[in-house]
């Protein structure tokens, strides 16, 4: 399995606090714990040529992990179109935290993907609401994060195919934090936690969910479906 971790990588360059938490970037932190799981992992960032997503790299990627925030608008539409097609062909996509506003997630959802938010050191408790789902294998009844950015409903997304995790925040809000979708041959997982000024991606259970999600989103090995005008499989008798 080949995983590509894409990170905008702007906060790490602009904010000393973020750079201290993630000295190798958010993508570096995610790559590290995925590599420990014996997964072949590569990274790419916004300011690389083609945002680090060449045709060759995209073609060999089984699962793409996406983190963005400040510069969604800088992602080239032609790159988004190529990622969209690869998802339809079967590539898995895991969208993290503020990636809810990314061009690719909004294109796949067909909605604004807007929400409420607050940075106030809220405690977050993510409840497992689908305990039989493989994405939460090895997770208890809930995941508790001491401090995180709040995301609150209404989250303007289509009803998930599967709702896996629901968050409660100290300020009283709730949020659909673990949502799965299928588009074409591809599987998509949106996972809420991961604000850049908190060390969320070092949390053992957060790492476990992402590892599980990568395995879940790994493409089914089959030929891409054919479309358009089709010849009959059987002889059609004249009436």
Image (spheres, helix red, strand yellow):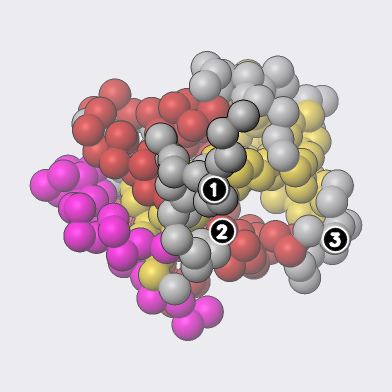
Gap in angstroms between the C-alphas marked 3 and 2: 16 Å
Neighbour class for label 1 at 10 Å: few (<14), some, many (≥20)? few
Extreme-front residue of the structure: 239
Disc sitting over residue 235 in the figure: 1
Q: Which residues are magenta?
A: 37-62
Q: Is residue 102 left or right of residue 160?
A: left
Distance, label 1 to label 3, CA atoms, is 46 Å
Q: Quick one: SS at disc 1? A: loop
- Cβ atoms at labels 1 and 3 below 8 Å apart: no
Q: Which residue is mark 2?
A: 217
**Depth check, front residue: 235 or 67:** 235
Which residue occupies the extreme left position in the image? Answer: 49
| Left or right: 127 as drawn, with respect to 212 | right
Task: Look at the picture and state if 136 lies above or below 14.
Answer: below
Nearest to N terminus: mark 1 or mark 2:
2
- Residue on which disc 3 sits: 132
Judge whether residue 196 can be spotted in this image: no
């Amino acid at each position: 399995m080949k995983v590509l971790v894409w990170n905008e990588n702007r906060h790490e360059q602009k904010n000393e606090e973020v750079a201290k938490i993630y000295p190798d970037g958010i993508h570096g932190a995610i790559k590290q714990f995925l590599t420990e799981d014996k997964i072949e992992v590569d990274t790419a960032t916004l300011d690389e040529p083609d945002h680090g997503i060449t045709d060759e790299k995209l073609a060999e990627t089984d699962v793409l992990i996406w983190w963005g925030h400040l510069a969604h608008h800088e992602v080239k539409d032609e790159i988004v179109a190529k990622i969209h097609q690869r998802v339809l062909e079967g590539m898995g996509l895991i969208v993290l935290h503020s990636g809810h506003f990314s061009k690719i997630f909004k294109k796949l959802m067909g909605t604004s993907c807007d929400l409420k938010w607050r940075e106030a050191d809220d405690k977050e408790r993510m409840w497992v609401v689908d305990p039989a789902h493989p994405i939460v294998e090895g997770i208890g009844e809930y995941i508790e994060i001491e401090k995180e950015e709040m995301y609150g409903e209404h989250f303007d997304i289509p009803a998930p195919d599967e709702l896996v995790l629901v968050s409660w925040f100290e300020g009283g809000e709730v949020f659909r934090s673990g949502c799965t979708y299928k588009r074409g041959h591809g599987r998509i997982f949106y996972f809420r936690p991961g604000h850049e000024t908190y060390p969320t991606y070092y949390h053992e259970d957060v790492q476990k969910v992402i590892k599980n999600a990568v395995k879940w989103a790994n493409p089914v090995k089959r030929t891409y479906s054919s479309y358009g005008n089709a010849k009959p499989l059987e002889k059609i008798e004249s009436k």
